[in-house]
Image (tube, rainbow, N blue to C red):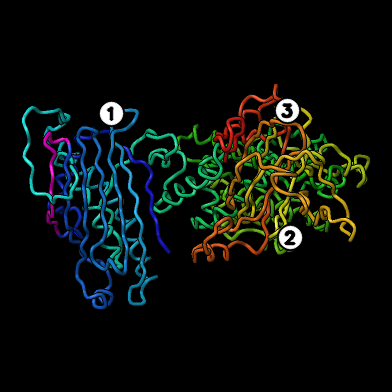
Amino acid sequence: MVQKYQSPVRVYKYTFEMVMAAYEKRFPTCPLIPVFLGSEKLSEYKSEDESLHIVERSCKLNVDAPRLLKKIAGVEYVSFIQKNTVNWKERTLLIEAHNETFSNRVIVNEVCSYRVHPDNEEWTCFEQSASLDIRSFFGFESTVEKIAMRQYTSNIKRGKEVIEHYLSELTAQGVKHIPRWTPRATVATTETMPENSRPAMAPLPDLRVESSELLAHCSTKEPLTSLCGQETLPITPDADKLDADYIERYLGQLTPMQESCLIQLRQWLQETHKGKIPKDEHILRFLRARDFNIEKAREILCQSLTWRKQYQVDYILQVWRPPQVLVDYYTGGWHYHDRDGRPLYILRLGQMDTKGLLKAVGEEAILRHVLSINEDGQKRCEENTKVFGRPITSWTCLVDLEGLNMRHLWRPGVKALLRIIEVVEANYPETLGRLLILRAPRVFPVLWTLVNPFINENTRQKFLIYSGNNYQGTGGLIDYIDKEIVPDFLGGDCLCNIPEGGMVPKSLYQTEEMLENADQIKLWTETIYQSATVVKGGPHEKLIEILEASSVITWDFDILKGDVVFNIFHSKRAPQISRKDSASPLVPLPIGNNVQLIEKNWVLGVDYSPVETPLICREGESVQGSHVTRWPGFYILQWKMHSPWSGSSNLPRVDDVLASLQVSSHKCKIMFYTEVLASEDFRGSMTSLESCHSGFSQLSAGTTSSSQSQSSSHISR
């Protein structure tokens, strides 16, 4: 498997010329980088006006590997080829490095760049990316890969320190400004350079050392050492990129590989969920929940994003108003913050009549109330981050079990609790910073045995359980929250406005039928989105009848499983859904949630015609678009399974066949919503989603559109 690294944007508050001067001090050798044994120039070129300077070097790096591995490999050092291209006119440096040693077994590539900050020409930005592909290495592939990546990431920080050291040295020497390049009347000399080399930039320090070092270690199957280090400073250079200082300020201290995982997952979301990706701290929570395994984190994050869209969770704080019964008898609420600045939520579970609440408002209302608490918690974390000047990404929950007894183990109540835990664990990972359980009674182990299997191991490690009055004194509650805010019911002096609970009057109980018909339940259980299954040879089709030309068909769908092809057809004939029998070769009955409308005897181009270019949609993508109808009649939206080699007269490629085998089973799943707008209600592309007549989620409002087949039609992802 190819290992990849992508750095955030790091910013120096120094001019490009100063940073280049500091970088140049690292050559030909650098005592601050012990693994760098030296370099030799292979070629060098300067343009006539000295605005372009290209240098190619061979760099030797010490092999920091176990002695046995060195003997097996038969080398003491590794070589990298590094090419530096400096453009003094444009004020950019591009560094490209690859390994020369073991290049038939290991492929290491690194690219680094320095450029002027787009918003402040007195500052310099730095980025680097690298990849490591160990194809074979005497049976030690896995070991070498781990050593290489660990060593490489550890040397990223060293690279930054080197640049900082030489910048400080220049400042101490009184060098605070270096003039920019200006055109010269005289012709500069050109040093030796192969004929096929392209022009280069004015002489410039060799960044490649870092790259070479990284590559060198990789090729040796040894830890990679990054030679392209940089100092991080505030300001985000590009809107779609993450700044290193922003990460530290708002997301916390991350290792280089953790930063890389965040950037890679964020980039993937930008490509597949344009205009509606979650906040960076939300993405980071899912990465933490899966130990920064990008594939696993992406899977659960996409499932959660689909769930949020389907049930409109993003708007729960605006639309949810808890019933008065919950306001009076739900014994939980926010109460200041803990010593680490985390919002503090107190739940007096022992005083809560779970059975009474379930019978009064139902399980769905309680679930929605819990979700609103979690949404509010994330909002409070953002606010506390600003207040305390450091990242606050989770909250503390204090659960008081005084009064817990066997009535709390009522089977429907436990079932509801387990469902809530399951939903919260799946969609709000790593939001709980600490859980303080106080005054746990003898019955608690029974409850713990029931809920323990549903709690993630990372979450379980955050639990602190106190029985009786053990929470008082040193090592107890006051170690985590200030004494001044300890609630009165726990022996403190702070009045707490959390309801005391008590038994819910039976007069407030509702029958199951009443609960099913309650408006609040409908708002939760019903969704504007529909789910459908697409099988091989069995597309899913949606019929839309248009009475007036220039009406606008809009759609929003997510590919939950597999790859599909999306088509739109127009027909003057109305498809007939009837039972399949010997006398009726018409459309087959819908199978499950798969509906087929185009009759088998219909001829393409005669009975129905495409009005859009087919769109291939990949698993995990979110697609929005619109089509301005030209004629009245029947429009059919079709999703069919995509074959990598469909439509090709040639034999399928091996890669395509292997890709198709990886597609989950022979079934695709989609979630979609469609709507028809009158032309006067449509305000161009996906902005129609903001129409007062539209039921689309505002999540899509920021999505950009791209013209697909005709100017009047728009599809966006």
Q: Circles 1 and 2: CB distance less than 8 Å?
A: no
Q: Give the residue at mark 3.
A: 549
Asked if residue 541 is among those painted magenta in the image, a careful observer would answer no
Residue stretch in magenta? 38-51
Q: Residues within 10 Å of mark 3 (few under 14, many from 20)?
A: some
Look at discs 3 and 2 and give the one toward the viewer.
Answer: 3
Q: Nearer the viewer, residue 64 or 580?
A: 580
Q: CA distance from mark 3 to mark 1?
A: 53 Å
**Of circles 3 and 1, which is in front?**
3
Q: Amino acid at mark 1?
A: Glu
**Mark found first going from the N terminus, 3 or 1:** 1
State the image quarter where residue 169 is shown: top left
Q: Residue reaching furthest top?
A: 680
- How far is disc 1 from disc 2 in space, using C-alphas? 62 Å
Q: Nearer the viewer, residue 663 or 657?
A: 657
Determine which residue is flagged by label 1.
Answer: 121
Q: Which residue is painted at 52% across and 57% down in the image?
A: 295
Who comes first in sequence, dot 3 or dot 2? 2
Give the secondary structure at mark 2: helix
Q: Is residue 439 left or right of residue 503?
A: left
Q: Which residue is mark 2?
A: 447
Q: Residue at coordinates 79% horizontally, 30% vertically from top-left?
A: 547
Image coordinates of residue 661 in percent, x first then y, are: 58, 66
